[in-house]
Image (tube, helix red, strand yellow):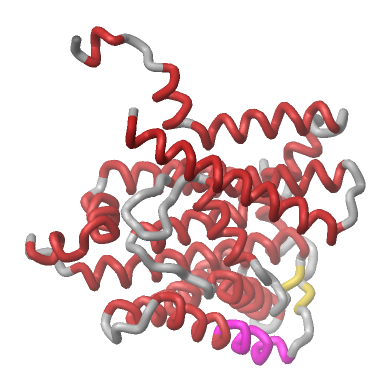
């Protein structure tokens, strides 16, 4: 009997799409726990708050697909936030070119890490740890440790309701773009291949080092843009932006089913993973759960989600 004749396989379907079921279940539970959850204001706040973590998670995913890790994303977020704020307040640059320049600086930090990994042969963990320290120090030196306050009508325009929340629209567009990049471009397919079997890719005549370096560059760019988004929401460029964001980004990718060994992961699922973490924090805030217990609860939920991924992955091999 062929697979077409077997018809719909519910077990296989549940295994393949468990990330989405976790997300839907969490939404249902959140709605049951708080009457305020499904209000327009709350859903808009979730979208605004999660725009930055989603971008960081996407960048992290492509690094993870190569079998690497990028611990510098939180610090590069601080660079993006402080650079854009300083350009706007001290040099009077319009917020759009300021955003572009901040992303370019993030790109340079990402390229620096990528060169250390791909060409100097330093492990991603160590190289990005060094960049994390350098980038955070750069942000503090740039601001002299003092948050940079921006005037109304500058960077906050990208979170303005009257402008239809540009950061939400931009984040949605970038999600679609990178889903397409991963699925339908040679670069996206090669990145996955490098993580799956770098030796085979090299034997095929493909220069894998360029692809590895490019994923770190992409991660740095998206992290810097995420930092700009955070600065826009607070109208402040602070060197403390993005602290511990690297761990949330890794958790989002793992919840989304990505393998830290490389070669497995999807943009859409990493986005869902970031939203799962955001929903957990949101519903606990709505229930007035203090911040420290939130971290404990979030940690156990992450463990549960990852264990579910492990179990379903094992079952998937036998389906």
Residue 204 percent across, percent down from the top left: 8, 60
The C terminus: image quadrant: top left
Q: Up-down: is 51 above or below 77?
A: above
User: Is 268 or 4 nearer to us in this picture?
Assistant: 4
Residue 181 percent across, percent down from the top left: 33, 48
Q: Is residue 190 left or right of residue 7?
A: left
- Stretch in magenta: 135-144
Q: Quadrant of residue 22?
A: top right
The answer to if 140 sits in the magenta stretch is: yes
Residue 38 percent across, percent down from the top left: 78, 29
Q: Quadrant of residue 155?
A: bottom right
The N terminus: image quadrant: top left
Q: Is residue 181 visible?
A: yes
**Residue at image point 35% right, 42% down:** 180
Q: Up-down: is 177 above or below 82?
A: above
Q: Is residue 93 visible?
A: no
**Residue at image point 63% right, 29% down:** 24
**Residue at image point 41% right, 53% down:** 259
User: Is 137 or 284 nearer to us in this picture?
Assistant: 284
Secondary structure mainly formed by the magenta segment: helix
Residue 116 percent across, percent down from the top left: 35, 83
Q: Is residue 162 left or right of residue 226?
A: right
Q: Is residue 191 left or right of residue 71?
A: left
**Residue at image point 48% right, 40% down:** 311
The answer to if 3 sits in the magenta stretch is: no
User: Is 143 or 65 nearer to us in this picture?
Assistant: 65
């Amino acid at each position: 009997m062929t697979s077409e004749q077997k018809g719909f396989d519910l077990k296989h379907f549940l295994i393949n799409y468990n990330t989405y079921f976790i997300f839907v279940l969490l939404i249902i539970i959140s709605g049951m726990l708080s009457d305020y959850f499904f209000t327009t204001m709350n859903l808009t706040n979730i979208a605004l708050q999660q725009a930055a973590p989603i971008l960081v998670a996407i960048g992290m995913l492509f690094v993870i697909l190569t079998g690497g890790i990028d611990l510098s994303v939180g610090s590069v977020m601080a660079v993006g936030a402080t650079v854009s704020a300083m350009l706007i307040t001290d040099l009077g640059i319009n917020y759009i070119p300021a955003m572009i320049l901040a992303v370019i600086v993030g790109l340079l930090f990402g390229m620096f890490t990528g060169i250390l990994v791909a060409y100097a042969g330093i492990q991603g963990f160590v190289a990005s740890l060094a960049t994390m320290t350098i980038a955070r120090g750069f942000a503090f030196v740039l601001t002299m440790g003092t948050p940079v306050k921006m005037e109304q009508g500058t960077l906050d325009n990208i979170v303005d309701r009257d402008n239809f929340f540009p950061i939400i629209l931009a984040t949605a567009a970038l999600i679609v773009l990178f889903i397409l990049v991963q699925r339908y471009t040679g670069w996206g397919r090669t990145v996955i291949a490098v993580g799956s079997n770098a030796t085979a890719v090299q034997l095929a005549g493909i220069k894998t080092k360029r692809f590895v370096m490019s994923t770190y560059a992409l991660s740095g760019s998206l992290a810097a843009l995420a930092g700009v988004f955070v600065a826009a929401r607070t109208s402040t460029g602070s060197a403390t932006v993005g602290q511990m964001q690297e761990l949330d980004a890794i958790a989002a990718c793992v919840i989304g089913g990505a393998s830290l060994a490389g070669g497995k992961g999807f943009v859409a699922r990493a986005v869902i993973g970031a939203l799962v973490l955001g929903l957990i924090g949101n519903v606990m805030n709505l229930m007035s759960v203090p911040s420290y217990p939130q971290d404990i609860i979030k940690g156990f939920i992450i463990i549960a989600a990852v264990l579910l991924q492990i179990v379903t992955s094992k079952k998937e091999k036998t389906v």
